[in-house]
Image (cartoon, rainbow, N blue to C red):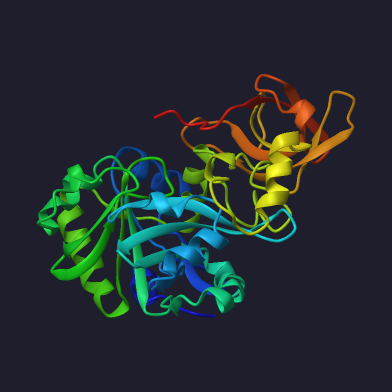
């Protein structure tokens, strides 16, 4: 089990620690609902240092990224980030990721913790003939997500960078919490605004301490992975391993918007055919019409009790006070407003298909 540079800090704060993607991670501190509301209404901090970081550099860097990723990275100017995915050779997804253009010929790929080795092997395979310089810096860097509507105000005293001027999916390399050359990125997985801060492992304790000092007046709190999951689900964001995996195509998962056929990429011909004929199944969002909590793996059934799909993510939404979830159903059942049922133990609980995000802010 790996630890992040802040594991002892989390334990000292009384965090409940759990194994996650090979790391010892804080799942909660005070409780999911309190932590969830802190991010929706104020400001909270997640240690997400388990995420993977790859540097792709040199004159062939863009060629490699264009080959392995679905989105068009040629559109990235300095200081911009892009959500993308790594298609596999059979129509599915190796991983979803964020691509940052750090310098003219330097890109940072941020990948899911559970997929670091798999992604590295996949990208390396295609790099054999392209010849970009690749470095896996995952074990050297830490990542803090400072999220919530008060994040800009609470953190401005820690940097000379004008935080309010950083647009969504843009970033600045600047000073933060007394450390130089920190990536301050206006990204996150919560839908409530804020930043993600990339720094070296040796620097993150200082950053953490100063973030909490600066945020004290804003009632800043540490937030665990459980609330991160409820926050992302309220936004309808896909979680790798649940809602997308090696068997789901970007078009089934509603990720056609990050799949650009302006270039040749891994399995692009086959994916173009899937797009042209429309996928046979789709990822839908749903809200329960009655009490109940949908969970991953529960069956989605029609009015006659016939199984038509499966729940991939589900929870009791802290913001909405009702059960919400994502799941795959045949495309004929996927229209917003349609009625389905979620098989929760012996009960088929009625639900309505809705277009995410569930939480409108």
Examine the image and state in which quarter residue 348 appears: top right
Residue at (70, 55) in percent of width and height: 92
Is 212 drawn above or below residue 298 in the view shown?
A: below
Q: Is residue 299 left or right of residue 183?
A: right
Residue at (45, 44) in percent of width and height: 33
Q: Residue 106: where, in percent of width, then height?
A: 34, 68
Examine the image and state in which quarter residue 267 appears: bottom right
Residue 13 visible to the viewer: yes
Q: Quadrant of the C terminus?
A: top left
Q: Is residue 216 left or right of residue 100?
A: left
Q: Residue 101: where, in percent of width, then height?
A: 34, 60
Q: Quadrant of the N terminus?
A: bottom right
Residue 349 visible to the viewer: no
Q: Residue 197: where, in percent of width, then height?
A: 29, 61
Q: Residue 203: where, in percent of width, then height?
A: 24, 75
Task: Looking at the picture, tell me which residue is in the foreground, 293 or 178.
Answer: 178
Examine the image and state in which quarter residue 103 appears: bottom left
Is 151 drawn above or below residue 19 in the view shown?
A: above
Residue at (18, 48) in percent of width and height: 163
Residue at (41, 40) in percent of width and height: 191
Task: Looking at the picture, tell me which residue is in the foreground, 157 or 180.
Answer: 180
Q: Is residue 32 left or right of residue 276?
A: left
Is 339 drawn above or below residue 72 in the view shown?
A: above
Total number of numbered labels? 0
Task: Looking at the picture, tell me which residue is in the foreground, 195 or 340.
Answer: 195
Q: Is residue 44 left or right of residue 109?
A: left
Task: Looking at the picture, tell me which residue is in the foreground, 88 or 330.
Answer: 88
């Amino acid at each position: 089990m790996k630890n992040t540079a802040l594991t002892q800090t989390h334990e000292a704060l009384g965090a409940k620690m759990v194994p996650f993607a090979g790391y010892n991670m804080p799942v909660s501190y005070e409780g999911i609902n309190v932590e969830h509301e802190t991010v929706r209404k104020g400001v909270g901090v997640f240690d997400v240092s388990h995420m993977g970081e790859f540097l792709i550099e040199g004159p062939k860097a863009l060629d490699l990224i264009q080959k392995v990723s679905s989105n068009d990275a040629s559109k990235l100017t300095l200081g911009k980030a892009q959500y993308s995915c790594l298609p596999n050779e059979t129509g599915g997804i190796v991983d979803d990721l964020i691509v940052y253009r750090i310098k003219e010929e330097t890109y940072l790929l941020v990948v899911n913790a559970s997929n670091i080795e798999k992604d590295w092997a996949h990208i390396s395979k295609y790099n054999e003939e392209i010849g970009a310089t690749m470095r896996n810096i995952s074990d050297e860097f830490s990542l803090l997500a400072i999220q919530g509507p008060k994040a800009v105000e609470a953190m401005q005293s820690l940097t000379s960078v004008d935080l309010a001027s950083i647009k969504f999916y843009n970033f600045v390399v600047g000073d933060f919490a007394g450390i130089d050359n920190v990536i301050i990125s206006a990204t996150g997985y919560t839908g409530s605004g804020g930043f993600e801060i990339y720094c070296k492992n040796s620097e993150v304790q200082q950053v953490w301490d100063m973030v909490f000092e600066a945020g004290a007046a804003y009632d800043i709190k540490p937030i665990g992975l459980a609330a991160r999951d409820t926050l992302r689900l309220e936004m309808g964001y896909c979680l790798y391993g649940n809602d997308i995996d090696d068997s789901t195509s970007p078009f089934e998962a509603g990720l056609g918007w990050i799949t650009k056929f302006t270039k040749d990429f891994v399995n692009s011909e086959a994916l173009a055919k899937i797009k042209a004929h429309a996928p046979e199944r789709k990822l839908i969002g749903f809200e329960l019409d009655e009490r109940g909590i949908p969970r991953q793996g529960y069956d989605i059934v029609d009015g006659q009790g016939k199984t038509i799909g499966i729940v991939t993510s589900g929870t009791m939404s802290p913001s909405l006070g009702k059960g919400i979830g994502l799941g795959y159903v045949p495309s004929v059942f996927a229209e917003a407003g349609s009625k389905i049922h979620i098989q929760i133990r012996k009960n088929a609980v009625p639900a309505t298909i809705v277009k995410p995000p569930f939480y409108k802010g």
